[in-house]
Image (spheres, helix red, strand yellow):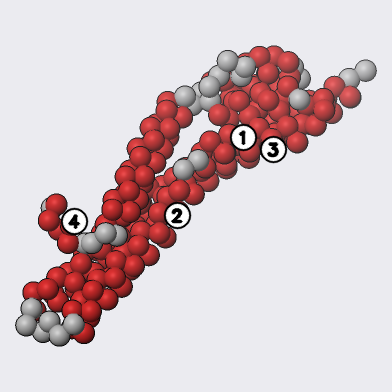
Amino acid sequence: MMQIFLKGGPVMWPLLLTSLVALTVVFERIFFTLRERSRRDSVAVAGIFAETERGNPAAAQAAGARSRDYVARVLTYALAHRDVSFSNALLQAAARELQRFNRGISILDTIVTLAPLLGLFGTVTGMIHAFGLLGASELGAPTAITGGIAEALVATAFGLLIAMVSLLPFNFLNTQLEQARQEIETAGAHLEMLLLRAGKAAALQP
């Protein structure tokens, strides 16, 4: 394996660094995803909705105050700042939580694009080396010429492999981000509807 790596030429070292960065991001994001799933607290979210529907937003805020569920945190923050602007507070809290889910995705996106380009650069340098041997009248050394072609092919294959392996977790993390966004938006819209309903009910009371 080491011999194949060395045949790829100097461009293999930045490709190796790229692969290590991708692995680090993937493992950190998988740990983050598993941790956030373990922190989901449907009881706290249901308690927030129930207290809001009863017309007691202070109790609803207290129901989600200690929860580590990201949906409950967004709803609690919005309730705490409902007197100023519920919608703006909801958007601010949602953006803060979604930023946590979005962390690392741009790095993987860059690696998916960069790795094949680095491999292509290795292809070009390998071909330049091979044809340089032809120009130097070293036709009696076909092994040296094919070595340059092998250098080009190894770098290209390694770059494509990094991109393909990184693409799967990249799409998975984007799916998790979109799922979190939909959950927050759905919960926020439901909470706002409950607040409006509770406000109308309080206004109708004598």
Circle 1: element type: helix
Which quadrant of the figure has residue 112? bottom left
User: In terms of sequence position, does the residue under pointer 1 or pointer 2 come before the other?
Assistant: 1
User: In terms of sequence position, does the residue under pointer 4 or pointer 2 come before the other?
Assistant: 4
Q: For the residues marked 3 and 1, what is the alpha-carbon distance in whole angstroms?
A: 9 Å
- Which residue does the numbered mark 4 point to in the structure image? 5
Pointer 1 local density, CA inside 10 Å: few below 14, some 14–19, many at least 20:
few
User: In terms of sequence position, does the residue under pointer 3 or pointer 2 come before the other?
Assistant: 3
| Numbered tag placed on residue 91 in the rendering | 3
- Which residue does the numbered mark 1 point to in the structure image? 96
Pointer 2 local density, CA inside 10 Å: few below 14, some 14–19, many at least 20:
some
Furthest residue toward front: 136
What amino acid is at disc 3? Leu
Q: Where is residue 54 shown, x and y percent of the image?
A: 72, 19
Q: For the residues marked 1 and 2, what is the alpha-carbon distance in whole angstroms?
A: 23 Å
Q: Where is residue 82 shown, x and y percent of the image?
A: 78, 26
User: In terms of sequence position, does the residue under pointer 4 or pointer 3 come before the other?
Assistant: 4
Q: Nearer the viewer, mark 4 or mark 3?
A: 4
Q: Where is residue 73 shown, x and y percent of the image?
A: 61, 25
Q: Nearer the viewer, mark 3 or mark 1?
A: 1
What residue do we see at 29% from left, 70% from top?
125
Which quadrant of the figure has residue 164? bottom left
Q: For the residues marked 4 and 2, what is the alpha-carbon distance in whole angstroms?
A: 23 Å
- Which residue does the numbered mark 2 point to in the structure image? 110
Q: For the residues marked 1 and 4, what is the alpha-carbon distance in whole angstroms?
A: 42 Å
Taking the image as shown, residue 170 lies to the left or right of residue 88, namely left
